[in-house]
Image: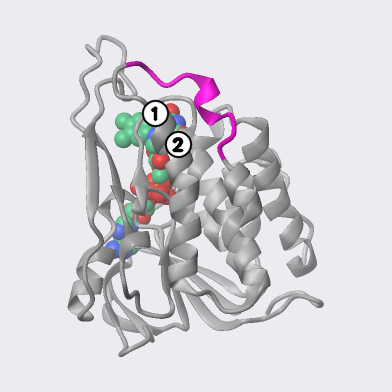
Amino acid sequence: MAGSGTQVTYEHVVVVGAGVAGWCAAAAVAPHCRRLTVVDRSGGTSHAADTVDLPARVQRALLALHDGLAPLRTRPRPTAARRGTVGALCAEVSVLPHVELRLAADALWLTGDPAVRSVEVMTASGMERLRADLVVDAGGRASRLPTWLAQLGHAQPPVETRPCRHGSAAPGDDGEHPTAHRRLRYDRLCSVPANVVAVGDAIVTLPGHHAVGIAVAGLHATALHRHLARGPLDPSCWFATAHRIGDAAWRRSDTSSPFRLPVLRGLGRGAAAT
Ligand SMILES: Cc1cc2nc3c(=O)[nH]c(=O)nc-3n(C[C@H](O)[C@H](O)[C@H](O)COP(=O)(O)OP(=O)(O)OC[C@H]3O[C@@H](n4cnc5c(N)ncnc54)[C@H](O)[C@@H]3O)c2cc1C
């Protein structure tokens, strides 16, 4: 039930994951579909991200997503959260009449050949098939998309990793962090099935300070919004764009020194052009 003047491209979109990237992507997709379901296997979503100071470029991206939702509102905008934060976006998207949030719903696999047509979800009442003409994987580092691609007979994306020694050190932490920078090179795949894309940490995980992951999630969503304005997504084209956005952060996040805020300067310029 997109707003007047907006091109409705999809009947039903399923976003897998109600984290930062999932909510940002939902805000980008909401104007372009009649129905949007956000599923998350956990029991609730957190907005710890709202405590992070975001660079001005990313705040502007989130504000643009807010503005895109204006024609869809059927009631006053929720005022609890500050505009330009992920929490505010989540609050605004989740009250839209064509949006449903399904918690404790674990997306297990995709079906469809050659294009993805549905996502199979395990809920408290059993397996459920959600028909979808677009699935957006925002499953974070735990994303199952590589496995799903293999199950559909496609190659899995090459994985690039490098150690992350700085991470988000807790007080008393020696700075060692078990996680690594990791990115999945969907942009290098020769074939990607239609109707499925990924965003955020599902593509590139850069654990660390200074809002890098949240910045990437926000910039992925604004790029998604721009791609959708042109019509149905071309997954190969999408993954090329998403890679460029993540790559800006990846190349600037050196492994031997902590992230510095200038890391984010320029992040998103490539996105603006895509
Ligand atoms: C220790 C640590 C500290 C960090 N500190 C910062 C920081 O200070 N600033 C910053 O910007 N970033 C930080 N990051 C990175 C930031 O947390 C991530 O970039 C960001 O949370 C990614 O958001 P996401 O939505 O892509 O993934 P996630 O936040 O991981 O969300 C994924 C969601 O998908 C759900 N999900 C996954 N698979 C399925 C499935 N199959 N079915 C249904 N639901 C599913 C999960 O339950 C989860 O809710 C940090 C990361 C770590 C590990």
- Quarter of the figure with residue 5: bottom right
Q: From the image, tell me which residue sits under label 1.
A: 253
| Label 2: few (<14), some (14–19) or many (≥20) C-alpha neighbours in 10 Å | many
Q: From the image, tell me which residue sits under label 2.
A: 249
Kind of residue indicated by mark 2: Ala
Is label 1 within 8 A of ligand 1 (CB to nearest ligand atom)? no
Segment tinted magenta in the rendering: 257-267
Query: Is there any visible trace of residue 41 in the rendered image?
Result: no
Identify the disc placed on residue 266. none
| Label 1: few (<14), some (14–19) or many (≥20) C-alpha neighbours in 10 Å | many
Q: Residue at x 72, y 61 (%)?
A: 69
Question: Magenta segment, principal secondary structure?
Answer: loop
Is 21 included in the stretch rendered in magenta? no
Kind of residue indicated by mark 1: Ser
Q: Residue at x 23, y 34 (%)?
A: 162
As helix, strand or loop, the secondary structure at mark 1 comes to: loop
- Residue 200 vertical position relative to residue 106 in the rendered view, above or below: above
Name the residue nearer the viewer: 193 or 85: 193
Quadrant in which ligand 1 is drawn: top left
Query: Which quadrant of the figure contains the C terminus?
Result: bottom right
Query: Is there any visible trace of residue 21 in the rendered image?
Result: yes
Q: Residue 233, how many percent across, how many down?
A: 53, 74
- Residue 147 vertical position relative to residue 191 in the rendered view, above or below: above
- Asked whether, in this view, residue 21 is left or right of residue 170, the answer is right
Q: Residue 121, how many percent across, how many down?
A: 30, 75
